Amino acid sequence: MLKNSRHAIFEININTLALSEIHKAYGGNALAMKVLTHPIKTYYGGSLQNYWLDNKQFLLKGQIKDLIASQFDRLFEHDCHAYNLLCRLGIYPYREIPRVQKIGLYCLLWDVKESGTMQVIESLQRRYLIEFEAGKYWLHPVIRAESLTRLDALDNTLLLMKEEIDKLLVRDEKFQHFLEWLREVTLLDSDFTPLDFRAFYLCLEYVYSFGIFAQDEFLELANFFGIPSMEEIGEVFFNFITSTDVSKIEEEMKVVYEIHEYLLYDLLIDKSLYDILELGRCSSFDPKNYLASEIDYLTGDGQYIDLELKQALQTLKSELPDPNQKEELFDAWWKTNSKNWAEKLRKVMIEYREIGHDWQFNRYDYLLLEEYYHANVLLLYCLYYCDYHLTDSVRKKIKDELFLPIAEIEKRKE
């Protein structure tokens, strides 16, 4: 028996001969021995002998696949919601995501009232048909294989999952306002897809505005688009730009490359502004000229930066205290004026780049935003790593509508 089912075996009246025969038939398979505990306890009052007598012929076949199929059949008869969830859980590619957070289960329970979702999950736990540890869940490969054979309309399952994820941010208008900003700030005429830009700016906000992730933290969402973390984004973009030999590009493609190069620098400007704002909100920093140096770098010659933005940043730099003065004088000025200085910078970012907004989210909002992030990551894993057939039209529809406000999604249905 596995560790999390040891307590169950003590609730069963052991018959040594029956246990020995079952163990022999299934070769001591841990999954088989585990899933048998629930029907023995529930339908045979814990009597292993009575269960053995009634199911001997079936059990002697020793086919784990047939045993699992029988548990699915029994679940379908007694708990259809748990059966549906178990089948739907087969959509997750567990080789790439060995563990699924609880939000990944909630998003598959679109036909269950919120008050009843945990009851459905616990139904699978009691039957040992779902593995769980430390608030995360997964399916045994044999159970997942059976789930996929029973799951009809895979396309529709992912579409309904997408709808549930979108509903996470429907309850409060400020979430929809944030998603509308995300849509508008990424309306760029480019060969890059709008989803690429939405993912980039979403991750920027999660790191710099929400503080949900750190700058050097691996971001699964950004990694789908070639960016391991916000800290590495400069290196990623710079490598893309410098690894291309422009002299070898066909003449008609040079314009396209130059547009891409400009856009990448454009994204780096926004990331750099967030870095400066983050630094401006620090209680102290060393060396004392670090903040001024960052502004100089961003506004230096050869940078693709708007002239008015450049002038506004240089004006802000001129307001900083002399970094060469006594350290205590610099720190005293910074302690008194840093908050006001950072707020001026934030307003400049909003005016010239439409970034840096104060979304007025509270800590409960951040928890919901974190669930929204993880749920979308799961959906992307399904799109990119699924080992089952998913039609191209559905894949495209889901990707086109990721991270969009409900109003925009509804408009696209018209």
Image: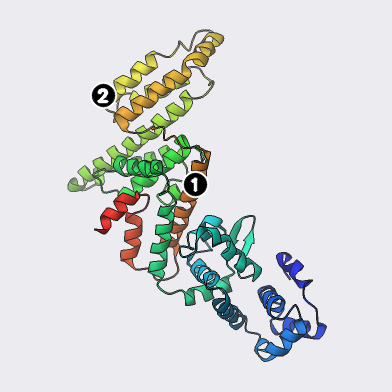
Mark 1–mark 2 contact, CB under 8 Å? no
Please identify the quarter of the rendering in which residue 121 is found: bottom right
The residue under label 2 is: 307
Say whether residue 183 is left or right of residue 53: left
Q: Residue at x 80, y 86 (%)?
A: 17
What is the quadrant of the C terminus in the image? bottom left
Query: In this image, 310 relative to 171: left or right?
Result: left
Residue drawn at 42 percent across, 52 percent down = 224
Rendered image quadrant of residue 116: bottom right
Q: Amino acid at mark 2?
A: Leu
Q: Depth-wise, is mark 1 or mark 2 nearer the camera? A: 1
Pinpoint residue 412: horizontal percent, then vertical percent.
26, 56
Secondary structure category for the residue under label 2:
helix
Q: Residue at x 36, y 46 (%)?
A: 198
Is residue 320 rendered to the left or right of residue 180?
Answer: right
Give 49 or 287, whichever is nearer the viewer.
Answer: 49
Residue 25 picture location, percent across and down: 70, 85
| Residue behind mark 1 | 368
Tell me if residue 405 can be seen.
Answer: yes
Residue 157 point in image, percent of width and height: 42, 67
Q: Quadrant of residue 308?
A: top left
Left or right: 179, with 335 as reference point: left
Q: Nearer the viewer, residue 200 or 244?
A: 200
Give the vertical position of 354 relative to 323 (above or below). Answer: below
Between marks 1 and 2, how big is the CA–CA gap? 39 Å
State the SS at label 1: helix
